[in-house]
Amino acid sequence: MIGGSGVYDLALLEDTQRIEIASPFGAPSGPVTIGTIAGVRFAFLPRHGEGHRIPPEGVNYRANIDVLKRCGVTDLIAISAIGSLREEFAPGSFVAVDQFIDRTSGRDGSFFGEGLVAHVSLADPVCPRLSSLAADAAQAAGAKVHRGGCYLAMQGPQFSTRAESRMYRQWGVDVIGMTGMPEARLAREAELPYALLGMVTDYDSWRDGEHVEVDQVVQVMHANAALARRTVNELARLLPPERAGSPIDHALDNAIMTAPAKRD
Ligand code: ADE
């Protein structure tokens, strides 16, 4: 699991071990904590680092995905604070995101490039099986859950202007955040089924006379911290004893364009 703003640890983890994992992509947001909940092995990484010191544009998304893959993670769920662009997605509710629009810039967004060219499909960027499990877990924990929603990843760190917020609504966007991309695209390249469970903290700035401020975001996050913890607990109980294979486990099978190197 990757924890966004307000989710800095998985308090329910038992028999924990904190491990520093090196990555050729640089430093991840911090050590990975590994442990168990109801017999299920979890690995946890707080996206913004301990004490929330790493801004959205400063997160080393490639290193984070790489170290989670290296420690044996098979499925990745991110829990993140999000703003709402729809009246019915009220603060305090959860959204199991199923689509993304990427408006970030200047972030390393691929493990591939010069020398090894690959194009994975991102048509369906979220794993439906994992996302529906995450939604079931949040519901079992007592949250109001919306299944499906289009997430716009903005660059930040400033919040949107009113004109941007209203334009995104016209585009059909449901929720907004600063970190879902390039995380989701990198998870796909790493063949990790990915789901994003967003906690709505605010209505962004499209409503007349209202705008978003950090104290409001933090207040709603704190009010929802126990719900987020209960969600993870429920998730551990809902996971099937045997992991069924996912097509995303083979996302790279048909993605590599570069010819294999010739051997003598
Ligand atoms: N995270 C939480 N609320 C947000 C908003 N309104 N815009 C971008 N990121 C957010």
Image (spheres, rainbow, N blue to C red):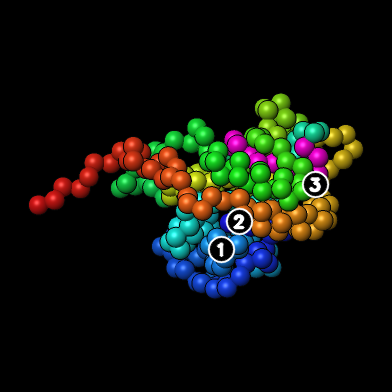
Q: Secondary structure at mark 3?
A: loop
How much space separates mark 3 and mark 2, taking CA atoms? 22 Å
Q: Which residue is mark 1?
A: 39
How much space separates mark 1 and mark 3, taking CA atoms? 29 Å
Q: Residues within 10 Å of mark 3 (few under 14, many from 20)?
A: many
Three-letter amino acid code of the residue under disc 3: Gly
Query: Is residue 98 part of the magenta span, yes or no?
Result: yes
Q: Position of residue 187 (x, y in %)?
A: 49, 48
The answer to whether residue 203 is seen in the rendering is no
Screen quadrant of the N terminus: bottom right
Choose between 76 and 153: the one closer to the eye: 76
Marker disc for residue 194: none
Q: Position of residue 55 (x, y in %)?
A: 65, 58
Marker disc for residue 236: 2
**Magenta residues (range):** 89-101
Marker disc for residue 92: 3
Q: Residues within 10 Å of mark 2 (few under 14, many from 20)?
A: many
How much space separates mark 2 and mark 1, taking CA atoms? 8 Å
Q: Name the quadrant containing residue 35.
A: bottom right
List the single residue furthest toward the left. Answer: 264
Sequence-earlier tag: 3 or 2: 3
For the residues carrying marks 1 and 3, which lies nearer the camera in this image? 1
**48 shown above or below 138:** below
Check contact, mark 2 vs mark 1: CB within 8 A.
Answer: yes
